[in-house]
Image: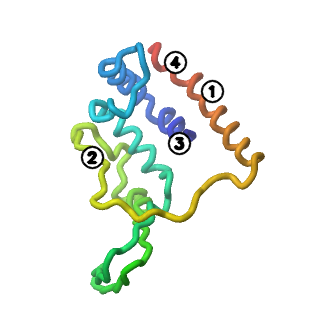
Amino acid sequence: MHTFILACILYPEWIPRAQKEIDTIVGEDRLPSFKDRPHLPYVEAIVRETLRWRPAARFGVPHQSTADDVVEYKGKEYFIPKGSIIFAVSWSDESDPKTGLPFKYDDSDSAFSGEITSAPFKFPAVFEPHSMQRAEVVRQEWVECEKDLNVLLPRHKEQ
């Protein structure tokens, strides 16, 4: 949420355009749902750009190799044994200042599929706070972010 707020402060022109797209597709009677996602390419681009700046899973989603494989990278070959856990660290590639763009996911190409070719194996870890106090800190942080959004976004809608 903080990254989204920062993005909206740095690029205030995103807000009215995204709001117009939501109002046109969804209307003002309800909130957008996942069913609306294919029809909201600009909002999707903003979400993807925000996640590019600060990904939810910085080291990617773990996958497991289903067979022995040899991968060539920069002229070297690497052996990946069957059952290896593999992380695709896209953050380092997407945050490269030489290739990164201020608004990388332009809505002119609305082919945002978000699909992966094969589902990853189940990851045996669960990420959750270790105590109720830590869970409360997360909840309070979320509430503060929502308050910030409620203050910032109406100002842009009026303009």
Q: Nearer the viewer, mark 2 or mark 3?
A: 2
Q: Nearer the viewer, mark 1 or mark 3?
A: 1
Disc 2 and disc 1: Cα gap in Å?
32 Å
For label 3, the residue is 3
Disc 2 and disc 4: Cα gap in Å?
31 Å
Residue 37 location (% of width, % of height): 33, 34
Up the image or down, 116 lies above or below 78; here it is above
Residue 139 location (% of width, % of height): 67, 38
State which tag comes first along the sequence, 1 or 4: 1
In the picture, which quadrant includes the N terminus? Answer: top right
For label 2, the residue is 113
Disc 3 and disc 4: Cα gap in Å?
18 Å
- Badge 2 amino acid: Ser
For label 4, the residue is 154
State which tag comes first along the sequence, 1 or 3: 3
Outermost right residue: 133
For label 1, the residue is 147
State which tag comes first along the sequence, 3 or 4: 3
User: Would residue 115 be seen by someone viewing this image from the given angle?
Assistant: yes
- Badge 4 amino acid: Pro
Q: Nearer the viewer, mark 2 or mark 4?
A: 2
Disc 1 and disc 4: Cα gap in Å?
11 Å
**At x 73% / y 41%, what residue is drawn?**
136
